[in-house]
Each structure stands twice: as C-alpha cells, then as structure tokens.
Image: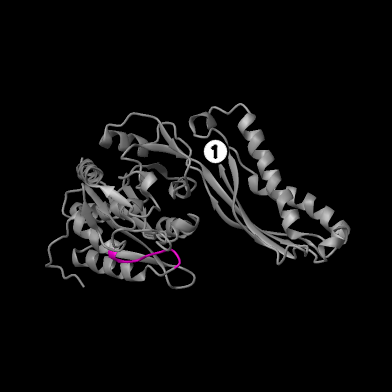
Amino acid sequence: MTSPGDRPLGPREILERLVAFPTVSRDTNLPLVDWLQGYLAGHGIDSHRVMSPCGTKAHLYAQVGPEAPGGVILSGHTDVVPVDGQAWTTDPWQVVEKDGKLYGRGTCDMKGFDALAIWALVEAAKAPLTKPLQLALSYDEEVGCMAVADLVESMIASDLPRAESVIVGEPSMMKVVTGHKGGVGIKVHVRGYEVHSSLQPYGVSAVMEAARLIDWCNDRNAENAAAVPSEMAAVFDPPFSTLHVGVINGGTAHNITAKDCDFLISVRQVPGDTGWGDKIVEAARGIEAGMQAIRPETGMDLSSVFGVPPLTPEQGGPAEALARRLTGDNGQHVVSYGTEGGQFQVRGYSAVVCGPGDIAQAHQPDEFLTLEQFAAGQAFMEKLVDDLCQ
C-alpha cells in the first residue's frame, strides 16, 4: 500500500504495475483496482468503486481540481483480451522494452493510456487547476462496451461536477477520432428436430435453418455494399454497415438432422443506420414459420448480447476542439471499431477518441506500444493539465 509520503510513480512505472495484473475480461480486476485506490489515496486523491453485479469486478472513478464546470474525463478500460493460444516471445504480464517498443498484454490496448491518465491525475492534483480532471476506468470493455454504462450513470449521479469533455484513450496514434461505428450482437439458438438424414423432409435441421439466417446476413451485406452511401457513411471504411457470423456450433453426426445450432450475429453499423436488431428478429421469425410448419416444437430463440452506441461526429463539440488544440491534429478521422465513447455521448457528453498506439497491435501476440507513442501520450497529458489551469 502506498503511503502519503511516497514519491509519485512515473508513467512507465505505472504501466509496469498495470500490465502485471492479468485482468483478462473473464477474470477479476479487483487486485488492480485495490492497488490503484491505494496509490491514489497515498497522494490525497479519493476514488470511488462501482461494483459489478457479480461482485468480482469494479469500475473506478476519481477527480482532482475544483468543483467547477468545464472539466475533462480521461476514459479507459482495465480489462484485456486473453493470451491463450498466442505465440508470445515475451512474458505477456511483464513490460519488456526492445527495439523502441514496450511489449506486454495491454500496453497498446489500453493500459498505456491508463498509465498516462493515472500519472496525469496525480500531477494535476498538485497544479492550480481552474477546471477539474476526472478519471474513469471500466471493466468488460472487451466483451461488448456495455458495463461502462453503469460507470457513466454513477458519475452523473455523484456529487462531482459534470465534465464538459471526454477523451477516450483507445489507440489512435494520437489522432483525433470523432466518429466510430456502433455494434449490435444477437445470440441465436436454433431448435431443430432430429430424424435420420434419409428421412430429412420429416425433420428440421437446426444447422441448415441457421444457414438460411446467415445467408440473409450475406444478402444484407451485398445490398449495403451496393447502395450509395450516405454522407455520414461515406467517411467510414467500409462505407456501410456489415453483418458477421464468426463462430457456429451445431449437430451431432452427418446422418442426423441437427437438433441444435448456436451462433452470434454481430453488426457494425454506421451512425444513423439503426434498427438492425429488429431486422434480424423479423428475418428469424420468417424462417421459424417455415420450420414450425414441419415440426411445431422447433424455432429460433434470439437474445441481445450487446448494443454499442456509435460515436457520431459533433458539430463544434468541445471535446474535439480540446483534443485538436492539444495535438495540433486537424485531420478528419473515423474508425470502424467501437469504443466506450458512444456510451458517454448518448448520455450527453461531448466525446472523442485519442490515445497512443496503433489499433493493429491490439489483441495480437507480442502486443506493443512504441516508446515514441508513449512519449506523445505523455506530452498530451502535460498539455492537458496546463490547459485545465487556464
């Protein structure tokens, strides 16, 4: 436990502490939160937990500076993806410097930014801020960006002044990203009826009926690709919403119509292109009617797994103005991956994505963050603290 007299840690030291906690989304993040609360308390900073329903994980938020409007939230997540089955050449739970790069799980996505944000919070606590700086660290971002909603709601309901801008530190090479696609995840369980495959017309194959819904997804992708993109969609790559099935499980043998089949349909939708969950349900119900005409007990059970709001570019948003002022980046940047930024934006915050590292390194074996990007992130934080003193 840190004591008030201990020296503040540098960004690299904080990063080493964070990476050493194996906060894979399936596991607890409480040891990391315990350490961080102790570290912040040792430097006079109160922080607050928002516990998960299962009690094994926690969000954390904190503030330094005056109780005044115009503040900034630095938003990051504490969870990382697994290393199972990946061919790492370094210890993923230890920061290893090599050839100008910092290797380790989460260095890029996104404990590098988290470390810089924690460092900035401690530095800001000693500065004559005229506007507050807030820290918001979440759990379970890697499994759908849903849990952060509780964190945002808790911050809104707290006694803290409502911040004006949110900087979500996902890896963007320190470019100012003003928009990203949203996400919808629909879990599908197909209930078939088993017969010997020689009697196929009298049974219902869950696998083959699943294929009908998946082919419906293929048809929608083709339609979306062929359509003239909207002005909003045109800036994305690809410039349309996409539907995808990555994993499917079903059946027991080649000569038995499958009783069960399970898969997940995920949609990455451009801002403004809504209603995909309802469209999927409608398509499934049409297929289900044909199934039940053969065997009434068959069907399709659908459930929502996640719904990630898109980040919509704002006209004259304060977060964009702030990030451009601090980075000097005046380019137009949007991305097709999702972040927690949309969860802040739908609750009335101005938000952008801006963080160190290349998203291409996220989730990879031998994940790394370059020293150059880490230094650029630190320079950003130094400018932010100065800006909050104006």
Residue 288 colored in magenta in the image: no
Q: Give the x, y percent position of residue 365.
A: 37, 55
Identify which residue, 297 or 175, lies in the foreground.
297
Q: Which quadrant of the rendered structure holds the N terminus?
A: bottom left
Identify which residue, 100 or 155, lies in the foreground.
100
Quadrant hosting residue 269 = top right
Kind of element beneath mark 1: loop
Q: Is residue 297 left or right of residue 94?
A: right
Residue 23 colored in magenta in the image: yes
Query: Predominant secondary structure in magenta?
Result: loop
Identify which residue, 208 or 232, lies in the foreground.
208
**Residue span colored magenta:** 20-26
Amino acid at pointer 1: Val
Q: Give the x, y percent position of residue 255.
A: 77, 63
Vertical placement of residue 243 versus 258, above or below:
above
| Residue at the (29%, 63%) spot, across then down | 91
Can the viewer see residue 272 in this picture? yes
Q: Is residue 243 left or right of residue 213?
A: left
| Residue at the (67%, 39%) spot, across then down | 220
Q: Give the x, y percent position of residue 179.
A: 45, 38
Residue position for label 1? 270
Vertical placement of residue 390 versus 39, above or below:
above
Can the viewer see residue 66 in this picture? no
| Residue at the (58%, 28%) spot, across then down | 229
Vertical placement of residue 84 versus 271, above or below:
below
Q: Give the x, y percent position of residue 238.
A: 52, 34
